[in-house]
Image (spheres, rainbow, N blue to C red):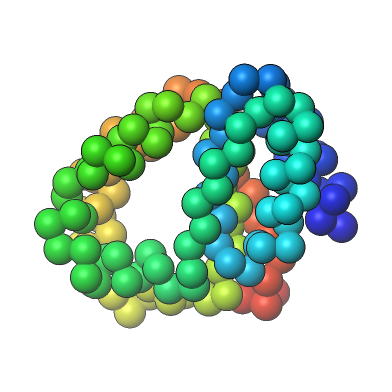
Amino acid sequence: MEAAFAQLLVEYCLEAQAGDTILVEAETPALPLLPHLKRLLLQRGAYPFFRVSYPGEGRDFLLYGGAWLERIPEVERALYEKADKFLRILSAENPLEGASLDPGLSLKHQRAWRPLAELRLNKRWTLTLYPTVGYA
């Protein structure tokens, strides 16, 4: 399944080309898919940059990020500015992990980091789900 899914994402969704820098954001449950993506992207001459987060990382950031919730680090901005295309793979083990948090934290973060979303939206991007027990 992973090989065919990776092929669909690389060839159809991203239309990966030689010279593309592609930022791939995924959570650890999607690890079985990542080697297939990397091989295909490299075979097409694209450069994949993988950013893998652990389950609960987003929640941890909201709880402990402090001032970073409202300030975009330069390294984040640079990643989004330099990437030509984006692939985000949602694969949460617990999609409701942040449900008990103050919604104001998430709203504050989303508003402050909106420029990154705008950078992504002005380029080719793909959002997909990878099956997990949490999504079942």
Judged from this view, the residue extending furthest toward the left is 67
The number of numbered discs placed on residues in the rendered structure image is 0
**Which residue shows up at 32% across the image and 71% down it?**
60
Position in image of residue 68 (x %, y %): 19, 54
**Residue 65 in view:** yes
Whether residue 103 sits left or right of residue 11 in the image: it is left
**Residue 119 in view:** no
Q: To which quarter of the image does residue 17 belong? A: top right
Position in image of residue 99 (x %, y %): 38, 75
Image quarter of the N terminus:
bottom right
Q: Nearer the viewer, residue 91 or 43?
A: 43
Q: To which quarter of the image does residue 2 belong? A: bottom right
**Which residue shows up at 43% across the image and 73% down it?**
56
* 60 vs 72: above or below: below
Image quarter of the C terminus:
bottom right
Position in image of residue 49 (x %, y %): 54, 41
Position in image of residue 70 (x %, y %): 17, 50
